[in-house]
Image (spheres, coloured by chain):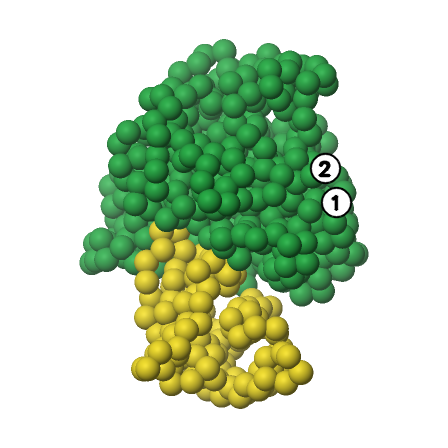
Chain colours: A green, B yellow
Amino acid sequence: MELQQIDDYRWRIPRHGGMLVDGIVYADAAMIDEIRNDPSLQQVANVAHLPGIVSAALAMPDIHWGYGFPIGGVAATDAEDGVISPGGVGYDINCGVRLLRSDLTRAEVTPHLKEIVAQMFNRVPTGVGAHRSDLRLSHQDLRGVLEDGAAWAIRKGYGRQDELDRIEERGRLPGADPDLVSERAFERGHAQLGTLGSGNHFAEVQYVAEIYDEQAAATFGLFKDHVTVMIHSGSRGLGHQVCEDHLRVMIGASRKYGIELPDRQLCCAPIASPEGRAYLAAMSAAANFAFANRQVMSHWVRESVAAALEIAPARTGIDIVYDVCHNIAKFEEFPIDGGNGSSRRGTRRVCVHRKGSTRAYPPGHVHTPPVYRDVGQPVLIPGDMGRYSYVLVGTQRAYEETFGSACHGAGRRMSRSQAKRAVKARSVFEDLEARGVHIMAAGAATVAEEMPEAYKDVADVVRVVHEAGLSRRVAQLRPIGVIKG
Amino acid sequence: MHEFFDHTGDIGVRIRAANPAGLFEAGAVAMTDVITSATVEPRQTDEIALCASALDLLLVDWLSELLYRFETRAFLVARAHVALAFVDEAHHLRARIEGEPFDAGRHAIKVLVKAVTYHALEITQDADGWTATVIFDI
């Protein structure tokens, strides 16, 4: 794969073959050496084949081999002439991250940490088939979740109305149509609201270890040594089924519309076609399920911390910092050819596919939450469970260069079997305890596969994003307690 | 028979059999092997019928059907008996599956599968028999 260096942090895959635009990868020289022979670069080139793709097929520094799109991939297609590709969203529709801040200090929490983790593990279902008997949705309830997202959960008492101000899209994608969500998806979803799932999903108790930008951190409610909780989860089986159902339709649609692609997983249909519109309506419904899912879990996390400390939930000071989607396709507007972002003139409406990428909007943008309009939108980047995660803030540069997108995490370094081989007899549980991280998990095998060394150092990924100007570092969060599926 | 191969974030499986029906039977066993390290007993049986326009799409449908049954009915497959037919331009599958309900006490979970992908999906035939390649999203 030919790769041209543009500057210290950008590499171009020149347009060739059926590519409609170049590919551009954000990475430093050391990262490029690691990914040079990886199938993920070919996947960037494959994405550049999508009809109507605008500007370039992009990849963030946490790029790794996915299915169809690379993980860490971003593609914007023209809202009128472009296509929508379910592979650019993935099976876990609106998988995302929510960060909660608190008034509690690390010193106050540490003596009660095991109890907090145990309370979270008891209240937030993890693992196979786990769900709470007090939250089993009727068909009608589930329709409400799919239509209204986080607002549905708040109506049912899981949180406060003003929390919607701190969720991407206010926790609800418009245009969701439950009638386009299959019976099977309903069946998979009805007992899964408020459940964490498995794999790399987690809920993590952390503390603010470093502050890089005092003003932004204070605006986000983050203070040194204060405790935070990060939740990483998505739309569960409901979203997986929506993707599966519509991928099959899209395989036929690609043929019908004469779209030739190098990987069937990229199958797509024009946004304006019946197949494209149906997928978008179903995807939005699944995304709303994910928003409600994280809303319910964060309510239970607040209750868990309060119960462990024997204080009222309101006294924890636990509030949402932000909630971001990192597997999503959304209609957004960007300045094209030097247009001004604050004005509608010179903008172009596109469908941004973010497959393992986080929106990173600048200060002053109308879709940056009003509470953060002076500093920019929080960008939440989870790392592995042994080291650290980061809070960044979006920039004008990202808005102009990457369709307002940044990285989404550390990116895997080892496959799951490599991780298991590397672990051998030693206990990841004991290793984490030695690092000061208390963990409870439904499955020991998952913990081994998710061990810290299986991931790239998220600090490297964040450094490249920061240096490339796609987001600025605000704070580093270090884990002290984790629950996993 | 099946073997796993490395995929950075997910799990790839290569399935080999003497004939296409054998691929589907071995695929069911591979699916269970992705999910649990425990032995699954053939205590209950059920029937499945599916059809698709291509054999590889039928394989994705088949494995997705088993995943759906695991997730919604907690049913793990021990083995499957599969018959395939090509009728009216479509591939038809009829199967009897044997297995048992998931028991958290006995069936240690290796990993939960989100979906069966089309990425690098392939069914090929050579002198030694048939091979299928499937990547599971984890």
Residue A147: image location, x then y, percent: 76, 46
Residue B114: image location, x then y, percent: 51, 59
Which image quarter holds the N terminus of chain A?
top left
Nearest the viewer among A225 and A407 is A407
Q: Numbered disc 1: what chain? A: A
> Residue at point 40% right, 31% down?
A12
> Residue at point 45% right, 40% down?
A16
The kind of residue tagged 1 is Ala
Q: Earlier in the sequence, mark 1 or mark 2?
A: 2
Residue A228: image location, x then y, percent: 47, 31
Residue A252 placement, left or right of A225 = right
Q: Numbered disc 2: what chain? A: A
The mark found on residue A51 in the picture is none
Q: Quadrant of residue A372?
A: top right
Nearest the viewer among B26 and A349 is A349
Which secondary structure, mark 1?
loop
Q: Which residue is mark 1?
A: A272
Q: Are marks 1 and 2 in contact (CB under 8 Å)?
A: yes
> Residue at point 58% right, 57% down?
A240
Which image quarter holds the C terminus of chain A?
bottom left
Badge 1 crowding class, 10 Å Cα cut-off, few under 14, some 14 to 19, many 20 or more, is some
Residue A273 placement, left or right of A113 = right
Residue A244 visible in the displayed image: yes
Give above or below for A408 relative to A132: above
Q: Are marks 1 and 2 on the same chain?
A: yes
Q: Which residue is mark 2?
A: A80
Which secondary structure, mark 2?
loop
The kind of residue tagged 2 is Glu
> Residue at point 30% right, 34% down?
A31
The CA distance from mark 1 to mark 2 is 7 Å
Q: Looking at this rendering, what residue extends furthest in the left direction?
A: A425
Nearest the viewer among A343 and A127 is A343
